[in-house]
Amino acid sequence: MEFYCVTYGGGIHMIDLMRWLLDEEIVEVCGMSNKKLTRGSKFNFDDTVTNLLKFKSGTVGRTTSNLGAQRPQIHGLSVYGTREKLHK
């Protein structure tokens, strides 16, 4: 495989969920990644990716995806509003 990104493995589903919940498209993206968790292994790609996503309305979202977590796969979602925070 010439190219792989952990966002494609599961993180893309959280990005799609945010698009669906907001019923908006993403207009700006900023991302950073590194290879800390699988350093020294044969895995040749960054193992942790964090993205900041700006939506058409100005709402900002963030996703973090990684391959080296020392716990079972989880998906979490927190929504911060002007009055309260929702966490699932």
Image (cartoon, rainbow, N blue to C red):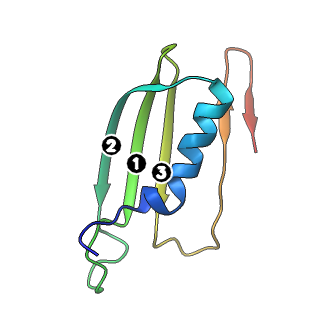
Spatial distance from mark 1 to mark 3, Cα to Cα?
4 Å
User: Where does the C terminus fall, quadrant-wise?
Assistant: top right
Residue located beneath label 2 in the image: 31
The reply to whether callout 1 and callout 2 are in contact (CB within 8 Å) is: yes
- The first of marks 1 and 2 along the sequence is 2
User: What crowding class fits label 2: few (fewer than 14 Cα within 10 Å), some (14-19), or many (20 or more)?
Assistant: few
User: What amino acid does circle 3 point to?
Assistant: Thr
Kindly state the secondary structure of the residue where label 1 is placed: strand
Q: Nearer the viewer, residue 19 or 40?
A: 19
Q: What residue is drawn where x is 48% and y is 16%?
A: 56
- The first of marks 1 and 3 along the sequence is 1
Spatial distance from mark 2 to mark 3, Cα to Cα?
10 Å
Spatial distance from mark 1 to mark 2, Cα to Cα?
6 Å
Q: Quick check: 84 left or right of 13?
A: right
Q: Is residue 26 above or below residue 78?
A: above
User: What crowding class fits label 1: few (fewer than 14 Cα within 10 Å), some (14-19), or many (20 or more)?
Assistant: some
Q: Quick check: 77 left or right of 37?
A: right
Q: Nearer the viewer, residue 14 or 72?
A: 14
Q: Quick check: 88 left or right of 47?
A: right
The reply to whether callout 2 and callout 3 are in contact (CB within 8 Å) is: no
Q: What residue is drawn where x is 51% and y is 32%?
A: 61
Residue located beneath label 1 in the image: 50
User: What crowding class fits label 3: few (fewer than 14 Cα within 10 Å), some (14-19), or many (20 or more)?
Assistant: some
User: What amino acid does circle 1 point to?
Assistant: Thr
Q: What residue is drawn where x is 50% and y is 45%?
A: 63
Q: Position of residue 82 (x, y in %)?
A: 67, 14
User: What amino acid does circle 2 point to?
Assistant: Gly
The reply to whether callout 1 and callout 3 are in contact (CB within 8 Å) is: yes
Residue located beneath label 3 in the image: 64
